[in-house]
Every structure is written in C-alpha cells, then in structure tokens.
Amino acid sequence: LSMKDKILQRFLSAKGEPISGQQLADELGISRTAIWKHLQTLQEEGYEFVTIKKKGYRLVEVPDRVDAAKISSFLNTKRFGHAIHYFEEIDSTQSVAQQLARQGAEDGTVIIAEEQTGGKGRMQRTWHSAKGKGIWMTIIVRPNIPPHQAPQLTLVAAVSVVLAMKSLYKNFIPVIKWPNDILINGKKCAGILTEMLAEMDRVEGLLIGIGINTNHELDDFPEDIQSIATSIAIEEKQKVDRAQLVAEILKNLEYYTDEYVAHGFKSIKKLWEEHSGTIGKRIKATTIREIIEGQAVGITDEGVLEILLDDGQVKKVYSADIEIQNE
Ligand code: BTX
C-alpha cells in the first residue's frame, strides 16, 4: 500500500472517529506535514475531513468510487489487486488489460473503470456499463496452464463472484448459468468474459473481465435489457459498497485460481455445481453449429457441459449460449 492508502485505511477503519495527526505521524513514521499533504490529496479525490479541536481529523465523506485507495482499504490478498489501474471512463477494461499484459503486467493486476463506453460481451456483443453503477473490471491472471484449459478459468471466476456475493449479501441467492452468467431470480446480474494471450502450448496471460450490475435502479438499464437484467441493489433492496465487493472477489479469485492451478478443475467443480442454476434444468443450447435441446446433467472434470438429449444420447458442449426453459 502507498502511504496515502495506508492513511486512508486508518481513517476508514476508524469508522468516523477522530484520529490525531500526531498519533498517525508517529504510527507511520512520517511528519505531520506529510500527513496533511496526503489528506489534501485525498480531499481532491472526494474524501472529506474535518478538524476537531484537540482530537485530530475525522473522515466525514467517502466518495462512491471504486478507486485503488478505496479497494485497498478492504483488500486482504497476497498478489491480486496489489496493482490497480483506475479510470473514470474507458472504452473497455479488456483493451487496457491486453496492452498491460503485453507489457508484462504482473499476475493479479486489476483494471477497473467507473464507466465503459465500449463494454464488450462475448461474440462482439455489447455490455452495458453505466457510470458509477457497476463493477467493470478486468483481472490479468497468469496461471501456468495449457491454452485449452483457459475456459475453465471462467468457471473459477464465476465461483469466486458467487461466493463473494453470498458472503456479503443476505437477501438473494445468486446462481451460475453456464458458462459465464450470474443470475438472480432468473435475471442477469453479472457476466464474465475471458480472453487469452497465448503461445502454442502456454498461456501467457488471461484477461478475466467481470461486469457486475451493482447499484442500478431498473431505469439505469437501457430499455431493451430491462426485462432480462437486474442489479445487486435491486435484489438486496439497498445500495452496496462496490469496493468491498471488488476486494472480496479478488480474495476469492486469488484463492480459487491457486487451488485450481495446484489441484486441477476437480477442486472447483463441486463448488461450481453447488451454485449452478443450470444443472438439472431443461435447456436450449445454441452453439455455432447447432441448437441442442435437453437436460443439463452436469459438467465434466474439464468444465464441459453435458446435455442429455431426449433420445438418451449425452452431448458435450464446449461453448454455447444457454436458455433455461420452463422458468
Ligand atoms: P454475454 O455476451 O454473455 O452477454 C451480453 C448480452 O447480455 C448482451 O447482448 C445483452 O443482451 C445483455 N446485456 C448487456 N449488458 C448487460 C448488463 N449490464 N446486464 C445484463 N445484461 C446485459 C457477458 O457477455 C460478459 C460481459 C463481460 C463484461 C465485462 S465488464 C469488464 C470487462 N470489460 C469489457 O469490455 N467486458 C468485460
């Protein structure tokens, strides 16, 4: 953490109680003037402090942003999120991630923005990324795996997101729709897009793009997706702290990626199935070649979806769009 982030972290954990400048200076081993300068910088970023006579400074206003300082104040990881690139506005965090990954950005580097003007879904679709409402981030992950295993990281990410939501919120149950959506009450709350930089036999870097509708009201969505989209705030019935959710996701993603690299997909599969909204359901899967209807019976140890057709045959689906029927 930078000194500024350390100071901010102290104030955030003081929960509005005053902290004496002298005490802070002693604790961090810097001068009171230096403390004051960092507070000035934080004020410019939207944090507001008041001075209380004989007691010190009190943090009275925390801006609703997902910047590095804010995320760091919740962060509890070994690598992930230790480098955070924050943007007010960007075309897509995936594009920036790609550049940074090519330039050698380290494992766990995060690119996050308040707003995306060209947010990407799969297959050239758009991802609507309203300003200040959601979590629009890409994590550069560098696992030592062969390229054909890359899609499994999408499932690892989905598990990480669902478990983060479950640990922070109590009013809804998120489920994973294979391979890359998180649904709440049948509506899409989050999507994951995994892109890869690879050589023939080795993954150089994976760009795990995570989009989560967080504090949207229904009319923050464009009309054409209002019937299929939802947000955490809508389901939880209150606004939530985006930075806290980001930190929780990074913690899970680091943990489960390490598990996965060390022990293979089997270690994740059970968790994935426990939180799946797909398995056991009748589904329609649209692949690039065909449309397959049947019952989703499970995923394989490789993360491939298995569909039981009406004639008793089991089909393996590597990549498709899924529609869950009878819901
Ligand atoms: P997807 O292709 O599965 O979903 C895209 C489809 O979902 C769209 O065609 C539209 O129907 C619907 N949709 C678009 N925006 C939203 C939304 N905000 N909420 C619910 N439904 C929506 C899913 O692709 C993968 C999305 C990844 C997004 C992240 S954000 C950070 C990173 N940067 C970037 O450009 N993309 C990723």
Image: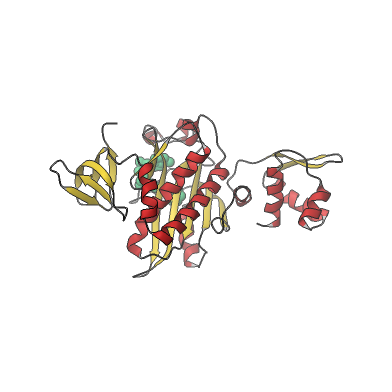
Please give the name of the residue rendered at 31% of the width and 41% of the height, measured from the top-left corner.
Answer: 278
Q: Position of residue 130 (x, y in %)?
A: 49, 41
| Residue ranking furthest to the left | 311
User: Can residue 224 be seen from the camera position used here?
Assistant: yes
Seen from the viewer's position, the closer of residues 170 and 196 is 170
Above or below for 324 versus 149: above
Q: Is residue 5 left or right of residue 322?
A: right
- Position of the C terminus, as image quadrant, is top left
For ligand 1, give the image quadrant. Answer: top left
Pinpoint residue 7: horizontal percent, then vertical percent: 72, 51
Q: Residue furthest right?
A: 54
Horizontal relation, residue 21 to residue 256: left or right: right
Q: Residue drawn at (87%, 41%), measured in percent from left and top?
A: 54
Q: Quadrant of the N terminus?
A: bottom right
Color style of the picture? secondary structure
Residue 262 quadrant: bottom left
Towards the viewer: 243 or 271? 271
For residue 185, above or below residue 72 = above
On the image, the x and y values in percent for residue 96 come to: 49, 58
Relative to 146, 32 lies left or right: right
Residue 311: x, y in percent? Answer: 12, 43
